[in-house]
Image (spheres, rainbow, N blue to C red):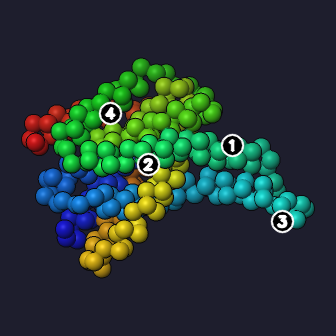
Amino acid sequence: MNAYASAALGILQGLTEFLPISSSGHLVLGENLLRVKFDDISFEVFLHFGTFFSVVIVFRRTIWGMMKAVGEKVRPIYGGLNRPNSLEYDQASANENWNLIWLILLGSVPAGILGILFKESVEESFSSPTFVSIMLLITGSILFLTKFFKRVEGKIKIPDAFLIGIAQAIAMLPGISRSGLTISTGIFRGIQREKAAEFSFLLSLPAILGATAVKLKDVLNRSNSSFDLWFYLIGMLFAFLSGWLAIKFLLNVIRKGRFEFFAYYCFLIGFLSLIFLK
């Protein structure tokens, strides 16, 4: 492992985390091409943490709105029943943000449960390029199916959030795109595409924080952590920058109704990796 490989994998992670082409799958294939081998998925967790900040920056207004909604809920508990007259309070917006918080929490449950129950099996799947290639082909097929669903204006409801959460849990498998599967599930459920994408990105935040918290202590306690940590931080920085660009690009693609175009890329990479990576 060196700084150049760390930066390259960080860029790869950031670009593929939010584009529906599987960041974990590309990371496995990238490690094989660069001949970089990790004992566990700690480095990937740091890269995901970089993309965490990408989501926070792009959706800072929505996140701030959710934070204010929480503040309005807890205000009476601390005696703040009267708001200053200079502050305008939008009750409808606050309720919408409060509901969004609960939908995100509900959608986070499946990944939390499956992550605990099948942690070892998931980590083992990261060592098989063949498995990753097959999962990329499956991702491509799912993305292609969105082509046949018309644009609608449906909002996210409780069943939608839970099903999208299940999709996120399945996407723990390398080669299955988290953003691809969650956004596609939203589209299949009749949710407005831009809203499905936003919910997908916001839903990633608890999952990233949870995975980082689990792995961070082990990484810092390693005997060679003073060297590994620098490489992790370099990768995290490049993952943040490229992730920010990827989110902006994907939102633009979704607005133009071209989401299924990513399917062809997944088919190409999946078939090529099956041929050249054993």
Q: Residue at x 85, y 59 (%)?
A: 76
Residue bearing the label numbered 1: 99
Could you say which disc has been placed on residue 49 in the image? none
From mark 1 to mark 3, how far is it between C-alphas? 22 Å
- Residues at circles 1 and 4 in contact by the CB criterion of under 8 Å: no
- Report which residue position mark 3 lands on: 78
Measure the C-alpha gap from mark 4 to mark 2.
24 Å
Residue 101 x/y as whole percent: 64, 48
Q: How many marks?
A: 4
Q: Earlier in the sequence, mark 4 or mark 2?
A: 2
* Residue located 63% across and 33% down the image: 158
Number of the label disc, if any, that sits on residue 139: 4
Using the rendered view, name the quadrant where residue 6 is placed: bottom left
Task: Give the left or right position of residue 213, taking residue 275 as reference.
Answer: right
Residue 81 in sight in this render: yes
Residue 7, position in %: x, y?
Answer: 26, 65
Upstream in the sequence, badge 4 or badge 3?
3
* Residue 88 vs residue 71, the one in the foreground: 71
Q: Amino acid at mark 2?
A: Ile
Dot 2: few (<14), some (14–19), or many (≥20) neighbours within 10 Å?
few
- For image coordinates 62% across by 52% down, the residue present is 62
Of tags 4 and 3, which is closer to the observer?
3
- Label 1 is placed on what type of residue? Asn
Tell me if residue 89 comes above or below residue 104 in the rendering. below
Please report contact status of discs 1 and 3: CB closer than 8 Å, yes or no. no
Q: Secondary structure at mark 3?
A: helix
Q: CA distance from mark 2 to mark 1?
A: 26 Å
Q: Nearer the viewer, mark 2 or mark 3?
A: 2
The type of residue carrying mark 4 is Thr
